[in-house]
Image (cartoon, helix red, strand yellow):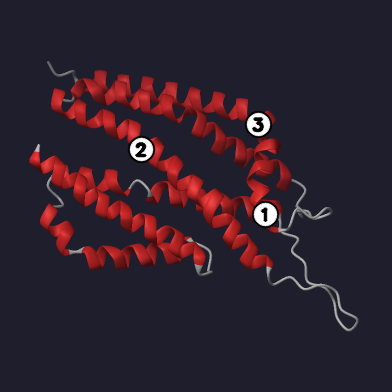
């Protein structure tokens, strides 16, 4: 029996309130550790600098450090509360799904965070060390007839860059789930996926060029695994069609 629209709206409001409360709790719990999280995020840069003593990040605005730590808390709080937010979404959507739809939805809920962690880990442990080393290669030591050139990056700019990479790689790794979902609702077919491989590769190259730093290694580190995920998606769609 279907619920009236008003009951759906009341249920939606309740789930949104719980999600916001969970997010707020996650942010509040994360803020005392925001400086430690920031140190973790800056570790690839520190290692690229050769772990030299005296190297530093700076902030040039009076509120910049506070706002940077607040952004870290928001990001960390969302990561902590994300499973609970997904659970609230399931409690709202689940009762309206058929049994076969529920069986499809659960693997997506489990696979999505895992794929995000895989992409974020590749960005942090793979791309950042290569990219930071490349950009630091433009530093110049002092000479008798000139000034030295040394990086003193702003903490807010560094945080924006590394979070952009982590989020971009994590979201790009959702590709198999997107393809499977589009295949399930009939937007994409197995034949179309096979036929348009070259266009998919071109789109992946363009996306990698946009979201990765402008060196050689970073785009390749996204192009190769992302295209591999595309081919894996074709295999998963083939298995799904057989079943």
Residue at horizontal 53 percent and vertical 53 percent from the top: 126
C-alpha span from label 3 to label 2:
26 Å
User: Residue pushed farthest top?
Assistant: 1
Q: Which mark is residue 134?
A: none
Left or right position of 216 against 136:
left
**What residue is disc 1 on?**
45
Q: Quadrant of residue 39?
A: top right
Q: Is residue 186 visible?
A: yes
Mark positioned earlier in the residue sequence (3 or 2): 3
**What residue is disc 3 on?**
31
Q: Residues within 10 Å of mark 1 (few under 14, many from 20)?
A: some
**What residue is disc 2 on?**
112
Number of labels in the image equals 3
Mark positioned earlier in the residue sequence (1 or 3): 3
User: Residue pushed farthest bottom?
Assistant: 145
Mark positioned earlier in the residue sequence (2 or 1): 1
Q: SS class of the residue under badge 1?
A: helix
- The image shows residue 138 at horizontal and vertical percentages of 69, 72
From the viewer's side, name the closer residue of 70 and 140: 140
User: Residue pushed farthest right?
Assistant: 144
Q: SS class of the residue under badge 3?
A: helix
- The image shows residue 6 at horizontal and vertical percentages of 25, 20
Judge whether 86 appears above or below 41 on screen.
Answer: above
Residue at horizontal 45 percent and vertical 40 percent from the top: 117
From the viewer's side, name the closer residue of 90 and 180: 180
Quadrant (top left/top right/bottom left/bottom right) for the C terminus: top left
Residue at horizontal 44 percent and vertical 30 percent from the top: 82
- The image shows residue 93 at horizontal and vertical percentages of 26, 26
């Amino acid at each position: 029996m279907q619920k009236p629209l008003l009951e759906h709206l009341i249920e939606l409001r309740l789930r949104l309130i719980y999600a916001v409360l969970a997010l707020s709790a996650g942010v509040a719990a994360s803020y005392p550790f925001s400086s430690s999280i920031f140190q973790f995020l800056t570790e690839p840069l520190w290692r690229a600098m050769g772990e030299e003593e005296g190297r530093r990040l700076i902030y040039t605005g009076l509120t910049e450090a506070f706002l940077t730590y607040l952004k870290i808390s928001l990001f960390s709080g969302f990561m902590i509360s994300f499973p609970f937010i997904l659970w609230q979404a399931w409690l709202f959507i689940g009762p309206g799904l058929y049994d076969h739809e529920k069986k499809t939805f659960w693997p997506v809920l489990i696979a999505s965070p895992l794929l995000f962690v895989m992409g974020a880990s590749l960005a942090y442990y793979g791309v950042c060390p290569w990219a930071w080393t490349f950009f630091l290669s433009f530093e110049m030591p002092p000479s008798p007839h000139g000034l030295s050139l040394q990086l003193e990056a702003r903490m807010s700019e560094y945080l924006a860059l590394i979070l952009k990479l982590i989020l971009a790689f994590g979201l790009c790794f959702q590709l198999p789930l997107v393809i499977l979902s589009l295949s399930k609702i009939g937007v994409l077919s197995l034949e179309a996926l096979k036929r348009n491989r070259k266009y998919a590769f071109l789109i992946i190259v363009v996306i990698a060029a946009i979201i990765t730093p402008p060196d050689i290694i970073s785009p390749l580190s996204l192009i190769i695994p992302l295209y591999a995920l595309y081919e894996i998606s074709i295999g998963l769609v083939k298995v799904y069609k057989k079943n």
